[in-house]
Amino acid sequence: MLKAIDRVMYAYTMIVNLTPDEVQATRQRLAAHLAGIVADEKALAVEGMRYLRGPDRVARRRTTGKTL
């Protein structure tokens, strides 16, 4: 699980500017969220990014060359 947390935090801090205190608090929130999930490292990392990015994110599918 630690690899997944490190992976998520690395990616998330590339997206969002956080202070060192915010990084630590975010890491603790993420660890608490992932603690009850049984999955492989990749699935944990994906779930971690979903959690940190929040419910406001709209999932959009990529179009395959079609113009909308």
Image (spheres, rainbow, N blue to C red):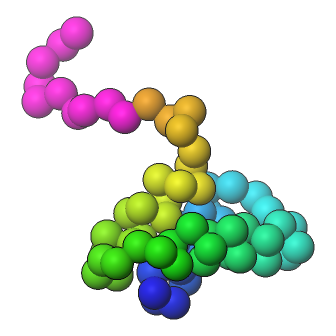
Residue 61, percent from left and from top: 25, 32
Q: Does residue 18 appear left or right of residue 36 in this picture? A: right
> Toward which corner of the image does residue 9 lie, by quadrant?
bottom right
Magenta segment: does it hold 6? no
Q: Up-down: is 60 above or below 11?
A: above
Magenta segment: does it hold 64? yes
The answer to which of 65 and 21 lies nearer the viewer is 21
Q: Does residue 23 appear left or right of residue 48 in this picture? A: right
Q: Single out the residue that lies furthest toward the front.
A: 36
Which residue is located at x 59 percent, y 56 percent?
52
Q: Main secondary structure of the magenta part?
A: loop
Which residue is located at x 71 percent, y 76 percent?
28
Residue 29 showing in the rendered view: yes
Residue 51, percent from left and from top: 53, 55
> Toward which corner of the image does residue 14 lie, by quadrant?
bottom right
Q: Does residue 41 appear left or right of residue 6 in this picture? A: left
Residue 48, percent from left and from top: 49, 64
Which residue is located at x 18 percent, y 27 percent?
63
Q: Up-down: is 7 above or below 46?
A: below
Which residue is located at x 55 percent, y 83 percent?
6
The answer to which of 37 and 18 lies nearer the viewer is 37
Residue 68, percent from left and from top: 22, 9
Task: Give the magenta range.
Answer: 59-68
The answer to which of 4 and 34 lies nearer the viewer is 34
